[in-house]
Amino acid sequence: MCGNFGFYETLPDGRRARRARVVGTVRQYPTRADALRAIEPFRIWLDLGHRYGRSITVSALATRYIEQELPLRRHSTQQSYRSALNRWISAKWGNCLLDQVTPLGVEQWLRSLNLAPKTKLNLRTIFHVIYTFALRWNFTDRNPIALVRQSGGRRAVPRILTVQEIRRLLEQLDTPYRSMVLIAASLGLRASEIMGLQWGDFDWENQTVLIRRGVVNGRIGETKTEASRKALPLDLTLADALLELRGCQTLRMRPSDWVFGNRFGRPRTQQDILRRQIKPAALRTGIGKIGWHTFRHSYSTLLRGLGADIKVQQELLRHSTVQSTMNVYTQAISEQKRIANSTVVDLLFGRGTFALSTNGNQQALSAARLAFLDSLSSDCYCGA
């Protein structure tokens, strides 16, 4: 026997029409409370929450948020939010009414999870977000997650590779994987940005590359932040290496073609490349466990060790705010960025000289920086 949920719908001409929606069988929902819980997401759509004199559940709130408010900017962000809501928040708190969730209870739950602090902080943030929307929709008058304390500190210091380790890794990789790692180490790009590169993004004459998009698991989307959509200096040596790669791709050289497309001309999946190519190569060289972001951390450390201006570091790494690097508000000129970037590329290619300003006004690197570069050439250097 099936049960129906009856309701009235206002038609465009103002008349009220009776409608019904099948809820399920009596076996599925033996009590009235079970049936109400089943139709709760639909009831919220009809804005009928107040008729039942009871708060809605966290699961119903999460369902509406996913359907109406889920960020559409990046596919990876959508995946992260869906996973957090369905796998963690709804799994634990789904049957709780909004007014039954307490700050202390959420803190104890987060503390019990065997997850990294940053992941726990992300769960807390998303939980806070859906309660914020509940406030806007008048489903609740408070946000208990605002009082939840959760640190986002790392469990361990990020892995930093030395110049010699990066060189040994490059020797173990074939085309095009060698070029991917070379770009990651020379420009500090995120994996999604490397997979999203097209030949039209390169301005060979002005020696720049514009980061326009990101690709996550084969899905094309926008860059992580607006600040990420910036032009970066393209060192001549790196440009030559990429032009050599382009010469090998005789069938896919148009501006709209992917630099690292697969045999079907589609973007590759960065996690497969990491698992099948880069990690095994790192193990063969004795480097150990690494990830895509290892190269970005290493690039940042090299810039910092070279004494690059903090604003230059921020713009080369394309952080949204300078606070992501350090709280400094000076302006960086493009020539400074080119010098800092070219010096890192020089190290990776093992050149004996380092890029200097073309206008002759910049002086050679200081003795302190040269000493630092000498230390980088040694296997004993462990990074900052």
Image (cartoon, helix red, strand yellow):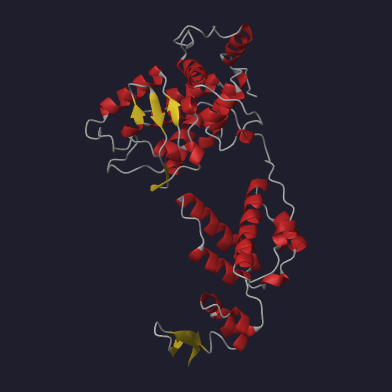
- Name which residue lies at 41% across and 23% down: 234
Check the image and report above or below for 303 versus 254: above
Q: Position of residue 270 (x, y in %)?
A: 43, 41
Left or right of residue 128, residue 358 in this image? left
- Name which residue lies at 54% across and 56% down: 81
Quarter of the figure that contains the C terminus: top right
Give the total number of marks visible in the rendering: 0
- Name which residue lies at 48% across and 87% down: 8
Check the image and report above or below for 177 versus 23: above
Q: Position of residue 59 (x, y in %)?
A: 59, 70
| Identity of the residue furthest to the left in this view | 251
| Identity of the residue furthest to the front in this view | 13
Q: Tell me if residue 91 can be seen.
A: no
| Identity of the residue furthest to the bottom in this view | 1
- Toward the viewer: 37 or 158? 37
Q: Tell me if residue 192 can be seen.
A: yes
Q: Position of residue 344 (x, y in %)?
A: 51, 19
Check the image and report above or below for 11 versus 273: below
Task: Determine the image quadrant of residue 30.
Answer: bottom right
| Identity of the residue furthest to the right in this view | 104
Left or right of residue 295, residue 217 in this image? left
Q: Position of residue 285 (x, y in %)?
A: 51, 26
Check the image and report above or below for 315 versus 240: below
